[in-house]
């Protein structure tokens, strides 16, 4: 399969230049002065007769056998897993899925790895940990087995944790601090008394307090002081002094980087008013709104402090006392290195206020895009796509997209127009007419579609949309079976209002690794709006993603039903409106749309209720290559509101993934766990993009 690729013209001068460079490397040089030739011969003769000591040493080194790592084994590690330890070593053994690989072994490198492991344990609160290595050379080949013995020692625990103000009082006693919220923040900090003292928890607690203070208008707030580790007592103490710094109000907003996009488009998305208190969350919200316009490659929104307020001294974070009177300063690796020696910032009055101007910087994308793509999949066989997109159609951040698609299932022409501002900045208008030709097993259809939607942002992550649809479906080539109810065919009109509620916290819609998605939709067909049939089609689609140790756990559940009304019977529901299951994007144990009620000819005719569920464990293997394990379940019933869990069909399997710019290329191998007599037990499917 091939993914979509954006097309751009090549520069002929670049091609000519590359050609000349390649020719320059390929052509040998035949001309040589007599003097240079004589010198070359003399040099060659002397090298042949009298090899240097360096050359001899190199030949001796080359004759030595190169050793390779067979395996790495850890002993005595209880607090840190073997995988975490391996991740911090340069010396690596080939993983099980690359059993043929030969990774070189260097003895000096393994000793440096021991120092890295000791440093890793110190970061996790084990300051007396040691790591010793034993090398076992194979008698049958150049392999080396590496045994690493870990002595973790006793953990250092946090004995006392105290935060005060420069005046000596507690922060929750200050008039600008909400005492209840401050105590709630302290309960959520990873630093806790009697817990193992980890440098990561120390840094995370500092950062959490800094962010908390920034949200209340104190971006210059600092925690002065350090943590002290007493190794003989295995105790640590943390004493910080919280310096508020000036309270900051936002100033005027300055926009930079615009070329063809009008400035008012960006201004409409800014949710920052001059005079309001500094808030990183509000600036992040403004950045997302501007970036979601689709007009810019990147967007930066930040408040600019005066030069004297932005230059801060570096604080000593952790002091380790190994012997009485001896101190060793230890600075966390996550801290940036100072660029110059600067004095520590003096304490600033808690009541002082200042104003920071806001800078909005953007980089525009090209306004137009042409995309040409093609590929092959088990559901659609061959497919091709051509689309044209304008990101600023006649100005105003309006979007216009025209797409043409062709596959083994039919063809479609569908333009889409979006007006981003209608009745305010939170409401969008989408108009999408289209012409579709469908070629399914049970029928063929020519469809004319018109969809008009209003979308409105209710709150963060929640969108509600409502609109009206008009479908004219000409269904023909229906294979009716003798003795059965005839399937609906001919021209039918389906029209009526629809409503959708969506909540999404996905980090990436196409390749999610965390977050959830919930979509509830109701589409109606009402005779009062000139529709031929009366029914309402309900669907609930939920998805969840959780990242666990570099892998992703993915879940999906779908419920759908069609409720007929008035004189409309269940068999009158148009074939194009019914539910089907099966295929590479739903139930991988069945062919495309093959899991549904069937007629006497064995063709799927769809149902009035559907239930689907999928679980995937996505595991990266090497570079762009990954594997998945999955379990699918589905059932389609001819009656509405019939979700027969006992009749679910199950399929389990594994798949391969290869990441491309257009999405993961995937091949799945599915085994039906409860097969019927009609179908086999095994199926292979291939497509582009994640299953969900």
Image (cartoon, grey):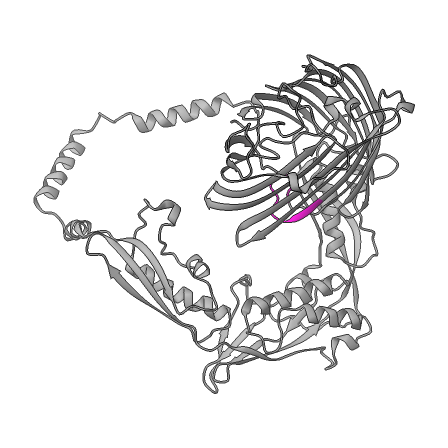
Above or below, 266 against 580 in this view is below
Find residue 279 and report its horizontal and vertical position in percent.
76, 57
Name the residue rendered at 58%, 21% in the picture.
Answer: 384
Q: Position of residue 543 (x, y in %)?
A: 67, 44
Q: Residue furthest left?
A: 49
Position of 655 with respect to 348 (left or right) is left
The residue at the far front in this view is 483
- Residue 37 belongs to the span the image colors magenta: no
Residue placed most toward the observer, 10 or 156: 156
Who's the residue at 54% across and 69% down the image?
Answer: 199
Quadrant, the C terminus: top right
* Depth check, front residue: 142 or 291: 142
Q: Is residue 563 above or below residue 117?
A: above
Task: From the viewer's side, name the closer residue of 500 and 604.
Answer: 604
Q: Is residue 341 left or right of residue 119?
A: right
Residue 638 in sight from this viewpoint: yes
- Residue most toward the right? 528
**Which span of residues is magenta-colored?**
508-517
Give the total of numbered labels.
0
Magenta region, mostly helix, strand or loop?
loop
Residue drawn at point x = 61 percent, y = 76 percent: 225
Q: Position of residue 578 (x, y in %)?
A: 73, 27
Does 360 appear above or below 125?
Answer: above
Quadrant hosting residue 343: bottom right
Q: Going 55% across and 61% down the picture, which residue do you hit? A: 336
Residue 455 visible within the image:
no
Q: Position of residue 659 (x, y in %)?
A: 51, 38
């Amino acid at each position: 399969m091939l993914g979509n690729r954006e097309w751009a013209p090549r520069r002929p001068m670049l091609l000519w230049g590359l050609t000349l460079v390649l020719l320059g490397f390929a052509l040998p040089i035949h001309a040589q002065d007599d003097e240079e030739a004589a010198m070359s011969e003399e040099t060659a003769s002397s090298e042949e007769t009298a090899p240097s000591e360096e050359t001899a040493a190199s030949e001796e080194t080359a004759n030595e056998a190169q050793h390779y790592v067979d395996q790495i084994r850890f002993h005595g590690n209880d607090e840190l897993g073997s995988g975490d330890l391996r991740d911090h070593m340069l010396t690596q053994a080939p993983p099980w899925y690359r059993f043929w690989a030969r990774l070189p072994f260097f003895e000096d490198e393994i000793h440096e790895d021991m120092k890295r492991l000791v440093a890793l344990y110190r970061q996790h609160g084990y300051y007396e940990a040691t790591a010793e290595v034993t090398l076992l050379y194979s008698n049958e080949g150049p392999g080396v087995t590496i045994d690493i013995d870990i002595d973790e020692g006793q953990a250092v625990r946090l004995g006392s944790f105290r935060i005060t103000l420069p005046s000596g009082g507690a922060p929750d006693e200050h008039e600008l601090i909400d005492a209840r919220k401050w105590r709630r923040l302290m309960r959520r900090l990873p630093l806790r008394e009697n817990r193992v003292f980890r440098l990561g928890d120390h840094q995370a607690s500092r950062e959490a307090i800094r962010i908390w203070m920034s949200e209340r208008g104190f971006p210059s707030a600092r925690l002065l002081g350090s943590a002290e580790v007493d190794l003989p007592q295995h105790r640590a103490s943390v004493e910080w002094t919280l310096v508020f710094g000036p309270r900051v109000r936002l100033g005027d907003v300055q926009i930079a980087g615009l070329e063809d996009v009008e400035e008012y488009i960006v201004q409409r998305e800014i949710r920052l008013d001059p005079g309001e208190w500094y808030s990183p969350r509000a600036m992040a919200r403004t950045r997302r709104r501007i970036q979601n316009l689709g007009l810019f490659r990147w967007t930066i929104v930040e408040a600019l402090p005066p030069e004297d307020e932005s230059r801060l001294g570096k604080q000593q974070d952790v002091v380790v006392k190994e012997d009485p009177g001896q101190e060793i300063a230890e600075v966390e690796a996550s801290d940036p290195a100072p660029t110059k020696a600067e004095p520590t910032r003096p304490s600033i009055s808690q009541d002082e206020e200042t104003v920071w101007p806001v800078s909005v910087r953007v980089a525009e994308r090209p306004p137009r895009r042409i995309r040409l793509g093609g590929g092959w999949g088990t559901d659609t066989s061959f497919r091709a796509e051509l689309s044209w997109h304008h990101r600023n159609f006649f100005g105003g951040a309006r979007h216009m997209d025209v797409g043409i698609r062709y596959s083994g299932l039919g063809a479609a022409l569908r333009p889409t127009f979006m007006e981003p501002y209608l009745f305010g900045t939170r409401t969008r208008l989408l108009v999408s007419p289209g012409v579709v030709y469908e070629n399914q097993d049970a029928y063929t259809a020519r469809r004319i579609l018109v969809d008009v939607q209003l979308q409105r942002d209710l709150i963060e992550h929640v969108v509600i949309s409502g609109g009206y649809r008009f479908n004219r479906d000409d269904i023909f080539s229906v294979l009716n079976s003798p003795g059965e109810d005839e399937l609906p065919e001919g021209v039918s009109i389906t029209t009526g209002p629809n409503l959708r509620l969506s909540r999404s916290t996905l980090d990436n819609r196409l390749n999610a690794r965390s977050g959830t998605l919930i979509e509830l939709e109701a589409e109606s067909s009402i005779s009062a709006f000139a529709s031929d049939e009366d029914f309402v089609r309900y669907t609930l689609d939920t998805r969840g993603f959780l990242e666990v140790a570099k892998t992703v756990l993915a879940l999906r559940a779908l419920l759908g039903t069609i409720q007929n009304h008035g004189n409309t019977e269940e068999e009158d529901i148009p074939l194009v409106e019914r539910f089907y299951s099966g295929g590479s994007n739903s139930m991988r144990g069945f062919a495309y749309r093959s899991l549904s009620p069937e007629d006497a000819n064995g063709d799927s005719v769809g149902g009035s209720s559907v239930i689907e569920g999928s679980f995937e464990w996505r595991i990266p293997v090497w570079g762009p290559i990954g594997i998945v394990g999955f379990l699918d379940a589905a059932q389609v019933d001819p009656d509405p509101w019939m979700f027969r869990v006992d009749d679910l069909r199950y399929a389990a399997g594994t798949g391969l993934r290869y990441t491309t710019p257009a999405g993961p290329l995937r091949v799945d191998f599915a085994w039906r766990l409860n097969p019927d007599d009609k179908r086999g037990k095994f199926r292979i499917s291939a497509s582009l993009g994640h299953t969900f």
